[in-house]
Amino acid sequence: MAFGTNDKLNFCLMTTANYITKALVMYDSLLKVCKNDFNFFYYTFDELTYDYLIKLNYKNIIPIPLYDLENFYPELVKTKKTRSTAEYFFTCTPHIMDYALKNYDIDHITYIDADLFFYNDPIEILKEVKNDSVLITEHRYFPENKDSVSGKYCVQFIPVKNDESGNKVIDWYKEKCIEWCYLKAEDGKWADQGYLNHWTEIFDNIVVMENRGGGVARWNSDAYNFVKEDDNLKAFNSEINKEVDIIFYHFEGLKLYSNKVMTVGLLKNEKVLFKLIYYDYINKLSNKENELMERLGISRKQFNYQAYDYSNFRLLLSCIRRILLPKKKKSDMIYYYKYLKNYKWLP
C-alpha cells in the first residue's frame, strides 16, 4: 500500500482550549492545499475544546474526548500522577495514533503538531513512504547543534500505515512512552522524541523525509532564503543548493497569553524571518480568535491561555532592554508583544 493521489488522508492531533486557535488555523491551511479529502481526528484534552468543536461542526473534524482515549488505554491514567501536563501529552502521542488506527476504518494515520502551518500539499511528503510503513523528520539544525538534547528527529509529523510493520512501531512506542516520558534528558531519552533516534536501527520499515520543504522551523531557517507570494512560500536551500516549495513550517515557541500578550522567540537577526513568515501567521491566529469568539459567543478568557507574569510596565521595560542589548549576544531572544484589539506592536 502506498499513499496515492486518490486516497483519503488521515491526520490526528491533541490539544486543550489554549491551542485550539493554532490547531484550527492549521486545519484551514490543510483545507486550502490538500487535493485529497481528509479526516482530522482531534483529541480534546479538556471539555471546553470538545464542546467548542461540537458547536463549530467542521465537516472534516472528528472530535474525540480524552475519556474515550483513557478508557481504551487504562495504563495512561496510571501515569498521570507521575507526569506534568506537558509530559502527559507527550505520553499520549503514540496512543492517539494507535486509537485512530484501531477504532476507525483507515489505512494510515499522520500525527501532526498543532502549531504547524501548511503552505503546500503534504501528499508530496507522504509519497516518500512508498513501500515502507513509517516516515520521520529530522530537525536538520542549521547551523549544526551538537548540544541539543531533544534528538535528531522531531515528532512534529509522523505518518504511519495501518499494517503489521506500522503497528509494530506504534506498539513499541506506546510501551516506551508509558515506561518513561519526561521533559528532561536521560540516557539518550527526551520526552516522546528521543525514542525516534533509534527507529532506523530497530525497525526496517522507517523512511526519513528527504523533502526539504517539510519540517522547516526556526532551528533550521538559516539554511533557507525565503520568497513569499500570497500564501505560496518558496525558498532556496543552501544545503542542497536548490529551490524548494515549503510544505509546512513549524511555529514552535510562539505562545499566546491571557493578558493580551503574544511572544515569539527569535534572535535579533531573524526579524526578516518574522516579517516574511510569522507576521502573516499571527494575523491568521488573530482572525481565527475573533471568528471563534463570535461563533461560540465566548470571551478571550475562555481559551484558557496562561497568564504572562509581567505587568504592562515591566513588559515595556523588557522590550527596551532587549533592543539595547548587544546584537552579537547569541543568547538574546527578542520577543514581539502583541496587544488586542488587532494587535498593537511593542516595540
Image (cartoon, grey):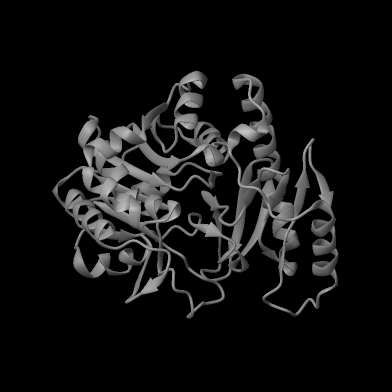
326 lies above or below 266: below
Tell whether 232 sits left or right of 342: left
The quadrant the C terminus occupies is bottom right
Q: Residue at x 34, y 75 (%)?
A: 188
> Residue 97 occupies which quadrant of the picture?
top left
- Coordinates of residue 93 in the picture (x, y in percent): 34, 50
> Residue 21 occupies which quadrant of the picture?
top right
User: Who is closer to the viewer here, 39 or 260?
Assistant: 260
User: Who is closer to the viewer here, 224 or 96?
Assistant: 96
User: Who is closer to the viewer here, 235 or 85?
Assistant: 85
Tell whether 347 sits left or right of 256: right
Tell whether 135 sits left or right of 32: left
Q: Residue at x 81, y 52 (%)?
A: 312
The quadrant the N terminus occupies is top left
Tell whether 323 sits left or right of 204: right
Q: Residue at x 16, y 53 (%)?
A: 168
- Coordinates of residue 205 in the picture (x, y in percent): 21, 58
- Coordinates of residue 333 in the picture (x, y in percent): 70, 67
User: Who is closer to the viewer here, 13 or 274?
Assistant: 13
| Residue 176 seen in this snapshot | yes
> Residue 265 occupies which quadrant of the picture?
bottom right
